[in-house]
Image (cartoon, coloured by chain):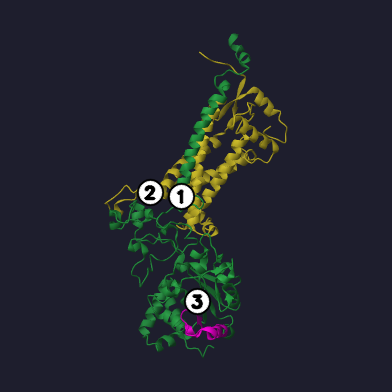
Chain colours: A green, B yellow
Amino acid sequence: MENKQPSFYEEVRGDGISRKDFLKFCATMAAFLGLESSGIGQIVKALETKPRLPVIWFHFQECTCCSESFIRASHPIVADIVLGKISLDYQETLMAASGVQAEEAYKAVMAKFPGEYIVMVEGSIPTENEAYCCIGGRSAKQILEEAVQNCKAVVAWGNCASAGCVQAASPNPTGAKPVHKIISGKPVINVQGCPPIADVMAGVVVHLLTFDRIPQLDALGRPKAFYSRRVHDTCYRRANFDAGLFVESFDDEGAKKGYCLYKMGCKGPVTYNSCGIIKWNDGVSYPIQSGHPCIGCSEEGFWDNGPFYQHLPSIAGFGIETTADKIGLGLGVATAVGVAGHAIYTNIRKKKEITNAPETASETEKPKAL
Amino acid sequence: MRSRTLPMREVHVWEMPVRVYHWVNALCVTVLCVTGFLIGNPLAFMKGTEAYLNYWFGTVRFIHFVSAFVFFFNFIFRTYWGFVGNEFSRWYNFIPLKRCQWKEIINVIKVDVLQVSHKEIDSIGHNSLASFIYFLTFLIFLLQCLTGFGMYAAMSTAFLPKLFSWIVPFMGGDMHVRQLHHILMWGFILFAMVHIYLVFYHDYIERRGVTSSMIGGWKFIEEDVIERHENRSEDCPKD
């Protein structure tokens, strides 16, 4: 297969992309991946010599925003290679084939490239009743379990595949579970976000191709190159946070001055992503730069830690917008009332001890009489 | 002048390290709660100025972190003292593993909380219910250290905070850790309210000088209580 398949480079040259643009792309990717300058050469060599990665790309319970994000990568080369040619393999949204032909394409990848192909998953998998997500008469769980058996690695795109996202939010009617909770024995890369940043997705693909191994992951399975720092730590408004300058409503003076959005519910301090560095749409902007707090979309359970515009999450079971502070204050008042009540009660019940008139009074007052 | 003479003896209950621990802890908890509250819900009292001119919120966080380190090492020291200190500070007071400790807990509830009985409680140090509540607060201390340093680990390169870097993934993310850290803070506030009230209550009822005992270390204890304490059965240190 090594010689028959055209390499990445050959494919993009065939699409009319100049060598200069190709090199620019390699340098950009090396920078995103945090490689030293010699890494650029490694990427160039890998893309020039290695064939395109065989990919099976599934859509389960999701909204396709990961694919939408990917095809908007600031540098279109990766999307061109992976998505432009992906109809050769299997990608439900973009492939030309349908029905029997689609199923054949999917089976062909597994047969032709055992141990070589990458399974990329968008969406969570229902476990409560597997019928909630069926493709070609088989459930998402069955399809995934079959596909990963001979794969090289699994890439879980977005919050759905990495943590369940909105489908897994309470009360999780479909019993939605992320990929890493369904399969075992294969490396899973959680490319978090709702959707993930296009360049992060491209970076993961390039890393897989160049180094032939999965990137270094954090303890939640996310590539460290992109998810090791908080949005807060890389935020250009961070100085306002330390200075104690906060926006208090979306139309106040602080908002105009670009103060910190912490009090507007910004989840930047609890969210690991590279929005503040790589940004979105070819580096144009990202939510905080547009004046909106971070909603924490690359974190597990972010839907259940809302509302978005309040930093302290509501506590389930106590009604909407009941935070720990409201409950705490209520308990504090109850405690104060309890303490005051007990003090009054004590003065009534323990009058004897307090007024110093125990039954042993005569005995204890003996020394006085002496 | 109203006065009375009682057959009482002074007992050295709280050794110096226990007293120092107590007040360092009280100071840390107060500072941590106040700064923690501000961090959770900062006052936006400044307007119309530039970020480079100010650093008050950074200072609040700095104070919180420094107090956290002091609190943490103080807590570790107290745990150590639970194995080497005098009989009133030893660990076995705090964990009710013996039947007599549970009996005393029920008695304290009857005598001091519900006040349906007027039996005397013989304890010289903490009574068994108080000790058990302190044990629960130690667990909250532990959880607060774990969640606090767990969040701190992400912005530190130092050895000690890095030891806690497994907490955040273990709990599934910073959001959950932060929420638990915030809820537990209320545990400290509620505990402090009841604790201070009960110290006053016991001093008011028993007049053993329990409030000042945490300053000087000495308590007034009735002779017969000491006698019973000294002749207690061996398997039960509190009976």
Res. A18 in view: yes
Give above or below for B91 relative to A8.
above
Query: Which residue in the structure is indicated by mark 3?
Result: A208
What SS does tag 1 mark? loop
* Label 1 vs 3, first from the N-terminus: 3
Q: Where is residue A292 shown, x and y percent of the image?
A: 36, 61
What SS does tag 2 mark? loop
Q: Where is residue B198 shown, x and y percent of the image?
A: 54, 32
**Quarter residue A311 falls in:** bottom left
Q: At label 1, which amino acid type do we have?
A: Thr
Using the numbered discs, state the Cα–Cα distance from disc 1 to disc 2 in whole angstroms: 16 Å
**Front of the two marks 1 and 3:** 1
In this view of the protein, which residue sits in the foreground, A211 or B204?
B204
Magenta extent: A86-109
Q: At label 3, which amino acid type do we have?
A: Leu
Q: Are marks 1 and 3 on the same chain?
A: yes
Label annotation for residue A323: 1
